[in-house]
Amino acid sequence: MQLLTDTKVRQAKAQDKPYRLLDGDGLHLEVRPSGAKVWLYRYWITSKKGGIYTIGAYDDVSLAEARRLRDEACVLVRKGLNPTKERKLAALVETEERDLTLAVVAAKWQAENAASWSPSYKRQVERFLKQDLLDTYGELPIKLVTSRHILQAIKKVEGRGAKSIAKLIRQWAGGIMRYAIANLMRDDDPTYALRGAIKMPATKHHAHLVENELPEFLRALKAYKGFGLVPLAVELLLLTFVRTGELRRAEWSEFDLREKIWRIPGGKMKARRQHIVPLSSQAVEILKQLQKMNWRNSAYLFPNVRRPSDCITSTTVLRAIELMGFKGRVTGHGFRGSASTILHEKGWPTDVIERQLAHTEKNKSKASYDHAEYLPKRREMMQWWADFLDEKAKESPRPAGADLSDLASKTE
């Protein structure tokens, strides 16, 4: 049998009935009365089972391309597969993969994890993930996203000076990719190679007061004439040394003044576990003052002046500290450092201090202990801390860094 040539195919004319031009190995060109020319492949899976596989129109598929596609179909036939069905399946997979974009998978990942996120963290994920990754690469099929795409995204964020956001973008992208792997959407995590791509600056600890600075600070706090609730917020933060966000979002429903306990829900905690704060007598007195000042019946201890249904902003306490003259010397979070340092120096057990600071226990067997295990000792420590601050408030302020030897040398 003589094989077809491009010239013979091109010059084939339509007739009253369809006819075929054979090329070999089952490939033939069907010329139809309409003038259409279609490549067909006649195959046999068994001696009794076969079929016709449509390769495509001559206008779209050349002779050489038709032979190549015929050969690919032959491979399937030798495996006992129907090439027509396999092409339909491949088209379905291609459509699914095309529609399964990075943005689509990111939305699925967020929906699965958002219940464990705080509202502010959820907003942060939605905002920066869209702005810094999805707006650029969101329409890419998840299988086509590469390390280079993620690297370009995080380097762009790093370039504007937001290294912490760049690091978060990489972490979130990694979460999306691991979700995709677990759900058979792709086979690898392209973010793994990017670990360490963003070099973070050395951690700067929050400025905090040392023991001999406390008298000066406590006197300044007593003299501070800011909005009535704010000095009480600063004082309560110093007494409880919780995180600033935990204090400003504190709600009355979390407190039992008779039991002298503050139970912070896990949803408000960094480690996502409920935290118990024993309240000293001094802390209880502050809470009673706040109750009398709650004339709006706000759910929050410290409601926002402009938006009573919301709490004070994240900068309120820091601004008050600055107005007291301690800008750069201490922050609200720094009270935790002051308490930790002084309590350790005074001999309180590390486990008790760390539990009160709500630091995550890396030892899993220790972390499994009931949260109230050290509660009696923590009650004792928190009352000692409050009494210690009262005593410091009575002392004459000394210059920062001064110690007894400094004072003795100045009196000689």
Image: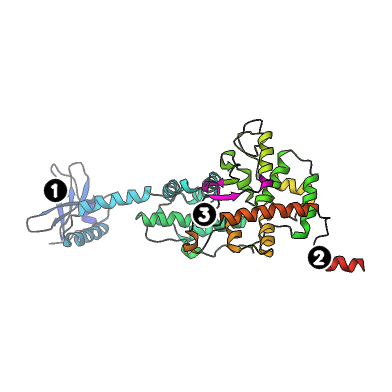
Decide: few, some or many residues near mark 3? Use Cα within 10 Å; few <14, some 14-19, many ≥20.
Answer: some
In depth, the one of 74 and 223 nearer the eye is: 223
Range of magenta residues: 263-283
Where residue 350 appears, as percent x and y from the top left, is 60, 63
Q: Is label 2 in a helix, a strand or a loop?
A: loop
Q: Which residue is mark 2?
A: 403
The tag on residue 392 is none
Specify the amino acid type for callout 2: Asp
Q: Residues within 10 Å of mark 1 (few under 14, many from 20)?
A: some
Give 204 or 231, whichever is nearer the viewer: 231
Looking at numbered disc 3 in the image, what kind of residue is underneath it?
His
Q: CA separation, marks 2 and 3?
A: 38 Å
Quadrant location, the N terminus: bottom left
Task: Find residue 19 and name its label.
Answer: 1
Residue farthest toward the top in the current orientation of the protein: 296
Q: CA distance from mark 2 to mark 1?
A: 108 Å
SS type, badge 3 = loop
